[in-house]
Each structure stands twice: as C-alpha cells, then as structure tokens.
Image: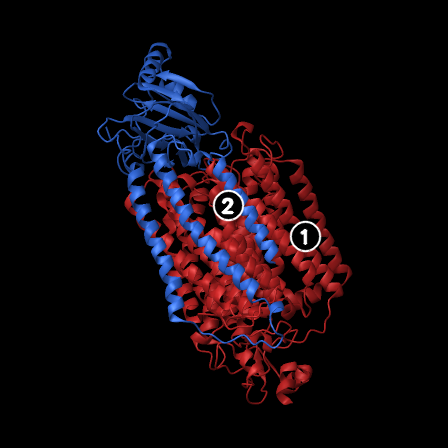
Amino acid sequence: MKRKLTLLSLVIGILAVMAGCEPVMVLDPKGPQAETISNVIWISIATMAIVVIAVFALLVYVVVKYRASKQDADYEPPHIEGNPIVESIIVGIPIIIIIFLSIITVKSTYEVEATPKGYEDQKPLVVYASSSDWKWHFSYPEENIETVNYLYIPTDRALEFRLYSYGPITSFWIPQLGGQKYAMSDMITTLHLAADVPGEYMGRNANFSGKGFAENIFHVEAMPADEFDKWVEEVKATAEPLTEEKFTELLKPGHLGQMTFSGTHLEFLPPPEGHNHGSDQSHEHAHHSDDSHGDVETDHSGH
Amino acid sequence: MDYFDRFAIPHPSPAIYASMVAIGLTVIAILIGLTYFKKWGYLWREWLTTVDHKRIGIMYIIAALLMLFRGGVDALMMRAQTAVPDNKLLDAQHYNEVFTTHGVVMIIFMAMPFIYALMNFVVPLQIGARDVAFPRLNALSFWLFFMGAMLFNISFVIGGSPDAGWTSYFPLAGNDFSQSVGTNYYLMSIQIAGIGTLISGINFITTIFKMRAPGMKLMKMPMFTWTALITNAIVVFAFPVLTVTLLLGTMDRLFGTHIFSMTNGGMDMLWANLFWVWGHPEVYILILPAFGIYSEIISTFSRRNLYGYTSMVASIVIISFFSFLVWTHHFFTMGQGPLTNSIFSITTMAIAIPTGIKIFNWLLTMRKGKIEFTVPMLYSVGFIPIFTIGGVTGVMLGMASADYQYHNTMFLVAHFHYTIIPGVVFAMLAGLTYWWPKMFGFMLNERIGKWAFWFIAIGFNVTFFPMFFTGLDGQARRMYTYSEASGYGPLNMLSFVGAVGLAIGFALIVYNVYYSTRHSSRNIGSDPWDARTLEWATQTPVQSYNFARTPHVDSIEAFWDYKKKGTPLFKGDIEKIHMPNNSGVPFIMSCIFFVWGFSFVFSMWIPAIITTIAIFACMAHRSFEKDDGHYISVEEIEDTEKDGEVLAYENR
C-alpha cells in the first residue's frame, strides 16, 4: 500500500516536473493579460500544492501507522466524537486559503477585463471578430480591411476585440495573449488583449460548435506597428473589395483558407451592438429564409 | 425529407450496422432464452412487477452496470481516436455523437441509477423500515428511468445519436445546426428518466422523514442516510428546472418556438443558464451519496465511529445550499463582467471549505483506528488523494480570471474526471462490493477485487493526469483530432494507454462477479464485515419484510452498540406484517412512456396522442384501484426467521 502510494506520488511528481520544463502555451505568455493569468495560475498551483502535500502526508501517516497489521490483535479503537480545536483548525485554515485566493481572483479578473495595464492612455486597435461555421472573420473598421482565418496585430498596442457569432456560440481564444471569451449571435462581447512580443501564435474557437470545430483555428501574427501599417496599406491597395454577395457566400458552413479583403462587412451587416438585440429587430427581418445557415443576424436599429 | 428517411441513420458506418445486428441478435437470444427456460412468469412475478425496494435496487445496479460499459466503450473510442494526430478511426460527426453519448450515458444513465441503486437497497434497511414510503411509485421511478435509458440507447441505430454535447447548448442543438432527430432523443429520454428521478426524490424524502425506526432522531441517522436525504432534497429543487428546460428545448425543436434560437427574439444564453442551474446541483446529487458511502466504509474498516459527525452533517447541508449558487462558473467566459464573475468565483471556492472538512474528518476517523484494507476500503482510501487533486483543480478553475484559460480545454476534462471518477465511480464500486453480500448472499473475491482496484486507480491517473498539461497547452476539449505540429500526440497516446488499463480493471470486475458467483462461500452470516449500521442486523439474504420486528435505536451506531454493549435492538413480539402488493402498472405505464417518447422524437402525433391518453388512463386506474396490500402471518415470519442469526442471538 505504502509503496504503491509512494509510486503514485512519484509519477505525479515526475509529470509535474515535466510541466515545468515544457513551456505549455498558457504558461508561456506573450502579452500582459496572459501574463497576469499565468501568474495567477502559478500562485494557485503553489497554494494548492500546500493543500495536496498536507492531505497526502496525513493520509500516508494514518494509513501506515494505524493499519490493522501493525497493531495488537486485541486493540480496540477508541470512540471519539470530535474535538472543537481540531475542527476549528480544519475549518479555519481552508477559510484563510480561500480568502487569499478570492482576493487574487477578484483583482486579476478586474485586470483582465479592462484595457491592459500600461496601455490605458492609448487608443486601442478595434477588431470585430465574428465567427461563422467554421471560420473567423476579422474586420478592422478604422483600417477598413477584413481578413478570414488570420489576424495581424501590432505589438505594444492595446487590442479591443468585439466578438459575435453568425452561428452557434463560439469562444475566441489566443492562449498566449490572454483568456477566451464567447462570441454569440445577439450581443457583442468585448475582449481586451495586447501582445508584447512579435511572433506567430495559435488562435482558435474553443467552444464546441459542430462538425468543423476541430479545424476552427486561426493564425495570429504580432508585428511592430510600422510593419502592421505597411501591411494595412498593402491590403488596401491590392485586396479585392468585400461585397455583400461575397460575404454571404463566405458565411456558408465549411472551411476556408486565409482570405483578405478591403472594406469590411460591418457596413452592410452591422454587428449586434447595444443590448439584447434579438427582440427589437425581429419585425425587420420577419421573412428570414429557411436556409438557416445563411440566416444572418442583423440590426439596423442601432444606427 | 421522406417520411421513412428520418428513421435511417444519417451518418452510417460499418460499426453502427454491426451494433445494429448485435442488438438484434441479443434481443432475440434473450427472448428465446426466456421462452426456452420458461422464465417469463418468473421474470414477470419476481422482477417486472416487484415493488420491493431491494429488488428495485438490484435492477438499478444491473442497468447502471450495463450503461457503465456502454459509456466505457464510447470513452475507449474517443481515446483511441485521439491517441495519434490526424487519426481517421472516427470522423468528426461520429466523434461528436460518441462524446455526447458518453457524457449523457455516464451522468444520467450510469451515475444516477447507481446512486439510486444503493439508496434503494440501503436506506430503508439503515433506518429500520419495511420499504420506501411509496413502493409502487418507486417501481415507477425505476421503470421510467429504464425506459428513458433504452430510448436514448436506440438512438444510434434508429435515426441517429445526439451530437451537440451532453450540455446540448442551443443554438447548436437547435434544428438549424443539428438536423437529425438525435437531440430529440436527448430531450425526450432525459425528460422521461428525469420524471422518474423527481418521483424518487419525493419518495426518499418522505421515507427518511416518516419511516425511521423508533428512537432514530435525525441526528442519529447513519451518514449514508443523511447524504441520501440531502441529495433527494437537491433533486426535488433542481430537477423541475431540468424538466422545464428540456420542455422549452422540445418546444423549439418540435413546435417552432424561438426560445433559444438566434433570431426572432430567442436568447442563446438562456439554455446555458437554465441547464447549469440544474447541472451544478446535479454534480452534488452525484457526489453527496458517495460521501455517505465513504463515511460508512471508512468507519467500518477503521473499526471506529465516524469522526466529527455533526460537522459532517453540517458540511453536506452547506454544500447542498451552495450548489445552487455557483452555476455561472460553467460560463465565466460569457461576458457577464468582472463583478458577477467575482461573486460566483467566491461562492465556488467556498464549497472547498465544507468539502475539506469532510476529507479531514475521514482522515481523523482513520487515525487511531485499526485499518483493514478490504476492497471497499481500498477504493475509499484511493479516493482521498485523487479527489483532493480534483478538488484543488476545481478551486483553480473557480478563479474566474484563470478560468478564461482553462475553460473548454482538456484541463477542465481532467478536473471533472478527477472529481467524478473517484467521487462517483469509486464510491459505487466500493459500495457495491461492501453491500454485495447483503444483496446476493456471498462475497466478491478480494484478490481479484484488489487487482481490479489497482488497474482502475493507476489506469485512471495515467489517462487523466496528462490532460492537465495538454489543456494548458491549448488543446480544446471535444476536438476529434489535432495536427501533429500541435505536439499533443505523445500525451494523448499516454491517455489512451491509461484508458486501456481502466478497461482491464472493469473487465476484472466482471470476471470477479462471474468467479465469485461460482466459487464464493454462501455461508457468510449476516454481518460479514463486522459493520456498524442497521442494514447488517437483517438476515442474509434479506427477507421481503426486512425486519421481523422493528428495531429500536438510541445511538448513531445502534447495531454496533447491540453487538458490543448488548443494547437490545428488537423489542416485543413478532406481529403480522403489512406489505404492499406487486403491480404491473408501473412497468406497463413506463412502456407506454417509451412509445410516447419515441413518437415525440419522430413527431408522430397520432401515437403521441394515443399514448398520452393511455398514460392518463394508467394514472386513473391507480386512483380508482382498491389495493390494500397483504399481510404476512406471524407463523410464516417465525418460520422464515428460524435461522435468523440476529433473532437466534437474542433468544439465546
């Protein structure tokens, strides 16, 4: 028993060390938000390690010391109802731990839900990221360009993603830049990110959305501001304009490679901004086609 | 779509056709077997119409074990598919159906019946009752669950399995994105089983409140009965939410309403909220009885009373209360904002406190004990470290900001398997092994049982521990495949190896049942474990009336005191016993429910109307029926009790 428990903890230990060596994405942050979360995770792992070690140690101690084979045949275990001091300790210490973690949680949650620290005085780059089965559309309203399944971003600038979906609930996630957030059909959610380090990152939809879910990935490239501006200019000069017709075609379920357009779909299909748009736009689009996948959520009343 | 096309499998494969044939052959074999051995009458009289809580408990166990293997095969398929990158074993649609089925089967049709199996068998015995409060309703509960499970299980050969995940989030589960009838099966089968569960909830609360043996105050109930009481209280509050949610989903899918749709004022966030308002309490419905089982087993095999009984009771009551205040943590990423998320983070983490109390109380129960490592005790001791890992990762997931990185990843999958497998599966296997001799009159082989335990415990850790890392490395859950470049390959392969270990463990359990049935001694007395609670004061096998004379209780461990201090347990003379009659109506009514559900799945309105009327006719029949039960005479009782050990002990 003891040997097997030691073996078990050894295996767990080795795996834990393995985690330390390999830079897993979430713990290899490339932006302030991801770094905040990564720190929170490390603090929680350290705190929880204390709990785990305490419980394991106590367990091994009682299991080894009080096993029947180590005791006299006529040993009669005592009747013990409880002890107020012991019980206050086993309530008190967890309460202290939870209070500590609560403070960290609240503080960090407010942090990652706001413009990243150190970027507050900048104007953020706004990107509308909308999902449709099974792709991502990135609209840059100020730059007036749009991409599909890839995202170019400038480093050292606050990024404000406005998320919505032309289909099931999806979740916009770039693990090395920060946490994820849902994209839904009748409201916009906002995700604040920033990248400190130029590089290529994995982005994906993390929320199960049907057949094409596994491949619902996008490519993220962070580059210095001047390179980003150069890319914008190039796209404007060379990419074909995005028409309503073309966009409706893009919304059809399936996988597309990376695509680039000048102009955005926001002009002819405004995003569901404002609160709870499902209800006040119904009369305008009462005659939705039955072709549900092309069924596009629109809202003109907000403009 | 042509009318009959709907019954075809939308996405066929050789494996499904093979299963279809296998199901057909099995059914034929069962029918022929029953006829050949002339067992139809026996089956009808002794099982299909029984209202005996012990037999119903055993039927729950059989169903739960069948479903465990069904869900287990699904799990193996998933791990095999993801063992190597870009695997082609299953395609995306099949994988989606498999993990959806795995989730639903394991939670609704395996874990739920398993806890009700043990509650059914043990609770009336532990409180010194003759049966549950409403025996016939109890039969109805079982058969509704069973028919719900069967309805769900035929989905993959008739019409297609649900493919939107066990959480079945709309709009993905709506007609627009899930066109087969799969989700209809999900909605109807869980609805039918859920009605059964709700009835059980009411039944057990009444039983525990009204039918306890004289002297058994609430604070003198055994811990398993306490957890059963609180669990059923959660059931009664949580399951109506599920009923309504499923009904709304059904309205959307079958009658064109727009409650969860993307257009016409529908609200896609509503399903997630309603689902988890039921779904989170459901987690505690599963875990609390497990806590009760561990309390009984750890106390029995440490040869000590349970440490901190009062704080144990307090903690389950607090857990049940908090279970209704944490549902939002299932979607911190929905954009509620930091204030809401902070509040739900704190309530979520707060649950760790009462849970921690329980862990420490178990450790303190073992302290100064005389620990014997029987198979049930091995599961209980193995539960503590594994569940602790599950618990602390739960606290980590409860921290909203960090959850933005864990959500929807394999980290989450690892976490909830680290809670639910030691919490439910280990507990059920421990409880099954522990109460097995009371159920069947012989013990399971300890040596094979220990081998099975080690395969399961080690296999489990090898399967699920790597997922913490792949999750942190960005592997989302529910992905049918991943690229080689992602680097998830080796750890997923390790998971698959662990899953094979788990499968071997479960196979050993089956072998153990077979082996022990053939070779175990039948001469085990009525109290083979030297246990402490009233269920062991009955004869083995337990008589239909449980106790010839009602026990009188004046401590938490009445039977232990009776054995050690000689405190008398049974007083007075044997009197005739009033027992309920068997009835075929619960079975028949549940069969009608099956057809009713099937009709709704395929929108066949005429049979739906006819079966609805038939269901009401069954209820009317019950209302007007005169059935006063029957009496077992004193002579008959004395005759059967002649060899009763407990009585013999007293008469000495």
Q: Do the residues indicated by labels 1 and 2 lie within the same chain of the protein?
A: yes
Q: In which quadrant of the rendered image does the N terminus of chain A lie? A: bottom right
In the image, is A254 to the left or to the right of B442?
A: left
Q: In which quadrant of the rendered image does the C terminus of chain A lie? A: top left
Q: Which mark is residue B31?
A: none
Q: Residue at x 60, y 59 (%)?
A: B429
Report which quarter residue A118 is drawn in.
top left
What type is the residue that disc 1 sits on? Answer: Ala
Colour blue, chain: A
Viewer-side residue, B467 vs A165: B467
Query: Where B93 falls versus B108 (above or below)?
Result: above
* Residue B646 in picture, x, y percent from top left: 62, 82
The residue to which callout 1 is attached is B507
Colour red, chain: B
Mark 2 surroundings: few (<14), some (14-19) or many (≥20) residues within 10 A: many
Q: Residue at x 65, y 52 (%)?
A: B505
Tell me which label, 1 or 2, sits earlier in the chain. 2
Does residue B546 show up? no
* Residue A50 in picture, x, y percent from top left: 43, 52
Does residue A30 show up? yes
Tell me whether circle 1 and circle 2 mark residues in contact (CB < 8 Å).
no
Determine the secondary structure under disc 2: helix
Q: Which mark is residue B414?
A: 2
* Residue B196 in picture, x, y percent from top left: 51, 60
